[in-house]
Structures are given as structure tokens and as C-alpha cells.
Image (cartoon, grey):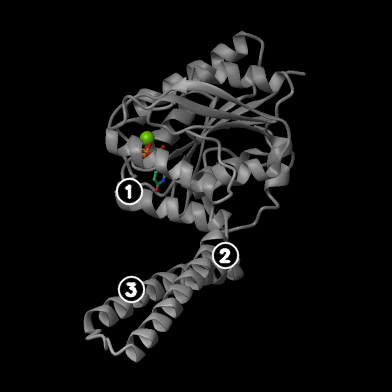
Amino acid sequence: MKPVLYIVIPCYNEEEVLPITAPEFLAKIKELVSLDKIDDKSRVMFVNDGSKDKTWEIIKDLSKQDEHYIGITQSRNRGHQNAVLAGLMESKNLCDITISIDCDGQDDINAMNEMVDAYLDGCEIVYGVRNSRQTDTFFKRFTAESFYKLLNGMGAEVVFNHADYRLVSSRVLDEFANFKEVNLFLRGMFPLVGFKSTSVYYARNERIAGESHYPLSKMLSLAFDGITSLSVKPIRMITGFGIFVAFISLVLLVYSIVQHFLGNTQSGWSSMMVAICFLGGIQLISLGVIGEYVGKTYMETKQRPRYIISERTYEMDNNNEH
Ligand code: UDP
Ligand code: MG
């Protein structure tokens, strides 16, 4: 039996991009079908992430043009990670394999052939990995590389230069459904599921049109979410640093007492100010980091839904086939 593939594509304000890339995804499905690798029930599934432009209208039109196009829409914008999750959870009972990919043409869709081959060879997760970042600016390359290094240094297992372009079998998704966290960092969570996995390399292109939704502030927030959702090491580092600073101040204390008895009374004002400011800074940072974890714990305890699907281009029926 040939596997049914769903290509899951999050879209937020992509009216300029979709008309260009959608036919490419469809052509890829048709190519894989004609190569006899996947079943013709395979679909291109768009997840509209509460776009404010015509994205959802375009998706609905596409679904009328060809039965291979389907779409779901979220009740509001919830962010890239949640949009991907919505698509994956929606498709897991409808297909055997999913490939998540951005809709802006940056990830080379031809890598899908190799991904499907790897699945047919027995891999349950196939990570798409960029082998060059030449089209990114130096700044984006530098920050991205530092980010992966930092993450791995913190003990999280993240595949270097892999974003959210990956093939996942529905078997893995069934297990993944038990990872209930609200703070999503998919690329760090899938390695935790286990199963046989491999990587496929591809060159990353420029965005076809429109603008990145990941300015520096969002990139930093994703990096921070990634670290704090995968590792408690920062808290431990703070404790270690606190002990270190306390130890240094003890040495300083002994030193100044000795100086006092030797009669070299320190004028001491500047050194005291430095110490106070330094410690004040460390304490605030520490509180901030701990606060981040407390805040995340609070958000997790609410167990709010991670996505809400308000409309589909297809009918849901009992055996979920369409
Ligand atoms: N995206 C989304 N919701 C958002 C922001 C982005 O679904 O709130 C989608 C977007 O349409 C695209 C993908 O996530 O398909 C990646 O976004 P983008 O290309 O802007 O990020 P970059 O490639 O610059 O990191
Ligand atoms: Mg992009």
C-alpha cells in the first residue's frame, strides 16, 4: 500500500506568495504520485493562521480548483508553531505521512522526494536541513548559528540548521499528541519522541515575495522560548553564578578586614558601588529568568487549547476520508 502524504503549510498574510507557491506544491504531489511513491489521496493542506488579508479566500478558491488542495483556518492568529501543530494534528488521522513546510518558497520542495524515500526506507522522522545560508544576511546567519549552539550547549537536542521543514509519520504524530505543552518549540520536541530518524540536506532560497514575519524581536523570543521550554539549565547556571559571586564577595570581605587592621582603611566608596550595582544586576537577571519559568508554568497549568479550527474547506466525516 502506498502512503498517503499531506503537505502541511502554515500561511499568515501570504496573499502575494500563495498563488505562486501553491501550484508548485500541487505539482510535487502529482509528481510523487506519478512516480508511484505516494497514493493519489495525498493532499496539499494549507493552515490559514488568522490572516488579515485574502489568504483564506485564496485557499478556498484553490480547493475548488483541484481536489488535492484542502485548507483549514484558525479562529485567530496564533503564531507559526501553533499553525503547524494544528495542521499536523488535523491530518494525523487522514494520512500516513506529513511534511510541514513554509509557504514562501524558501525551502526547496525537491527535497521532498528524498524525504519520502527515507520514509519508504523505514525512517519515521526526516529532518530537512539547510546546507547553505548564503541567501540569508550575515546577521541572520550569525544569530541563527549562535542560537543552535546555545540550545545544544543547554542540553537540548536540536538538529543543527533544521527549522520546521520535516517529514513525520502519523505513528510519530500519535505519540506527539501526548506532548501537551502550550509553549511549543516543535524542532526541539520531535527529537524527544524518538523513532528512527534521518536528515535530508537542501539549499535555502530567498523568500519569493512579501516579508518575513520574524523580525529580530520575534527571533529572540523564539530563541528564549526554545531554551526555556527545553532546558532548566539557565536556572542552574544562575545558582552556580550566585555561589561564585558570593564566594568572591567573601574573599573581598576578608581582604578589606585585613586591610583595616593593617591600617590601610579603604576609601571604598567606588568599590562598594560597583559591588552593589553588579549584584543588583545579577539579581534582576536571575529574577527575570526564574520569572520566565514561573510564567511558563502558569501558562501550562491553564491547559488552554493550542489551536482552534473555525472552518475547513472539506466536510469532516466519521471515517475522516475526503
Ligand atoms: N506564519 C504563520 N503564522 C505567523 C507567522 C508566520 O503561520 O504568525 C507562517 C508564514 O506564513 C510562513 C511561515 O510561517 O509560511 C514562516 O514565516 P516567515 O517566512 O515569515 O519566517 P522566516 O522564514 O523569515 O523565518
Ligand atoms: Mg520564510
Q: Residue at x 55, y 72 (%)?
A: 298
Three-letter amino acid code at the position of disc 1? Lys
Tell me the distance, in whole angstroms, between the alpha carbons under discs 3 and 2.
39 Å
Residue 9 rendering spot, x and y as whole percentages: 48, 35
Q: Earlier in the sequence, mark 3 or mark 2?
A: 3
Three-letter amino acid code at the position of disc 2? Arg
Q: Is mark 3 within 8 Å of ligand 1?
A: no
Label ID, residue 32: none
Q: Residue at x 39, y 69 (%)?
A: 285
Q: Earlier in the sequence, mark 1 or mark 3?
A: 1
Quadrant assignment for the N terminus: top right
Residue 50 rendering spot, x and y as whole percentages: 41, 49
Tell me the residue that label 2 is attached to: 304
Tell me the residue that label 1 is attached to: 52
- Is the residue 103 above or below the residue 76 in the image? above
Mark 2 crowdedness (10 Å alpha carbons): few <14, some 14-19, many ≥20 = few
Q: Residue at x 53, y 70 (%)?
A: 239
- Secondary structure of the residue carrying tag 1 is loop
Tell me where residue 213 sits by quadrant. top left
- Residue 236 vs residue 288, the one in the foreground: 236
Mark 1 crowdedness (10 Å alpha carbons): few <14, some 14-19, many ≥20 = some
Residue 40 in the figure: left or right of residue 249: right
Residue 206 in the figure: left or right of residue 35: left
